[in-house]
Image (cartoon, helix red, strand yellow):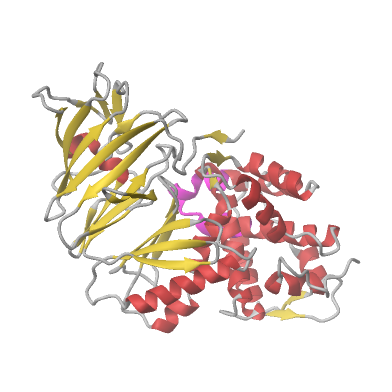
Amino acid sequence: MFLALIALAPNATAERLHRYRVSVDEDLGGLQVHACFAGPGPQRLVAESLDSSMALERANRAGTNKRLEPNGAELRLGTLPDDSCIDYRVNLIEFAGRHQHGGNPTRRVGSDLITDIGLWFWRPESLAADEDIEVAFALPEGIAVSTPWQRVEDPHLGIVYRVGHSAYEWPGTVAFGRFAERTLAVPGGEMHVAVLDGRPKVDEQQIAAWLQAAAGAVATLYGRFPVASLQVVVVPGARGPGPVPSAYVLRGGGPGAHFFINQRRAAEEFRSDWSAVHELSHLLLPYVDSADAWLSEGVASYYQNVLRARAGIITAQEAWQSMVTSFERAAHDVSGVTLADATDRMYRNGDFMRVYWEGAAIMLLADQRLRERSGGRQSLDAVLEQLQRCCLSPELGWRAGDLLHRLDELSGGSVFSELYEHEVKADVFPDLTETYQKLGLKVSPEGKVILSEGAPRQGDRDAIMRYSMTEPDPRSNSK
């Protein structure tokens, strides 16, 4: 069954609003929190990172000398009077962090600082539907903050943030520094971009253009960006191949995309890079449990080629070539275990190629079958748009089986459940031979993809790379 979690967006009608005031040190090395609880206070606070107790320098009930001592990632408060407050101080730098949760450990980036929310944010273990937490920052002059939380305009404090109810196990990141957070408008939403300090200095105009193009490509799926607000943190100084050696999407507190870039690479390399479209394509799905990463990574891997072709970043020929080549490489990585088992082992043995691209192959099969069975009136695009309208709520996390069953309900068929049973539970890579024949994809002995004319489903092949939600491709046939 799906993972029942609570709403991420702020509750505009929250009857109990707990208020946190966070004062950040001049050198960004620590912060002081004054937390006040509306009504009866919680008996304990929790922090997600196991390093949180080491980073916590002191905690006490406000106005008293009564110390509060952590027990691992738990801070017992006891029975507090109504409307009580506590104070605590966290050292963000001078501790031996080993267990940070956010994928991006707390560290300095040049003169800026990036930190795992779970390291310093001690919060009630759970919030009722009518509760929320408001966070306001007191920042040194010239310092900005980037958070994944929902922005709210307060008449007295200016911009404050509502934390919402995202699950504790979903990591998130906050950054402090002398950056000027830039808001980029995208169809149906905004990206709030923080480019951290680097040497040489990052060309922020170039990065903004790259992100804008990637977001525009994702918006071609159904005419709008899948989320209304996205935190984007760009961290320079990464080492490795290409302009973006690593990147990921986090969901804790709200959607956030994090890109670790090599700012020395040429602008053209960023323009042709696939990683931004891949990461932003993750937002087409709700949170999917990491045990089913083949689904979220499969959708992102499939669309990183399809959407770049639609946006004109690459040609349809290049998109098909990239996918087919990746399928062939992934097929060689199958070693007698199911895709589900390979996903479970992925982070231990590095079997990313098989998991990502077998997931993408399943998405291609689903897209082709939906189009064929509906005579071109249905597609993976259309089903994901329906999912966005009904079920992309950040309050829910999903297991793959349940999400695919929901996609079947939306599409009025059994395409996704059939693929789940036949492919995810199989210990061989999907046989794409028939699909290639129908779409007119011929692969030479040297691995070159040839787009042949007159194939039974050529209209579907072409529509995949330029399909419009508002105007179905007239060439998609119904044979």
The N terminus is located in which quarter?
A: top right
Q: Is residue 112 above or below residue 424?
A: below
Image check: 410 left or right of 241?
A: right
Quarter of the view holding residue 322: bottom right
Front residue of 118 and 15: 15
Q: Position of residue 31 (x, y in %)?
A: 17, 45
Q: In this view, does 296 lie above or below 329?
A: above
Asked if residue 345 is among those painted magenta in the image, a careful observer would answer: yes
Quarter of the view holding residue 333: bottom right
Front residue of 310 and 321: 310
Front residue of 120 and 13: 13
At 27% from the left and 46% from the top, the residue drawn is 136
Q: In this view, does 23 lie above or below 45?
A: below
**Which span is picked out in magenta?**
341-358
For the stretch drawn in magenta, the main secondary structure is helix
Asked if residue 283 is among those painted magenta in the image, a careful observer would answer: no
Q: Where is residue 321 in the image (x, y as percent from the top left)?
A: 64, 76
Image check: 329 left or right of 228?
A: right
Q: Is residue 301 above or below residue 93?
A: below
Residue 329 can be seen, yes or no: no
Q: Where is residue 227 in the image (x, y as percent from the top left)?
A: 52, 56
Q: Position of residue 94 (x, y in %)?
A: 13, 47
Quarter of the view holding residue 48: top left
At 46% from the left and 36% from the top, the residue drawn is 13
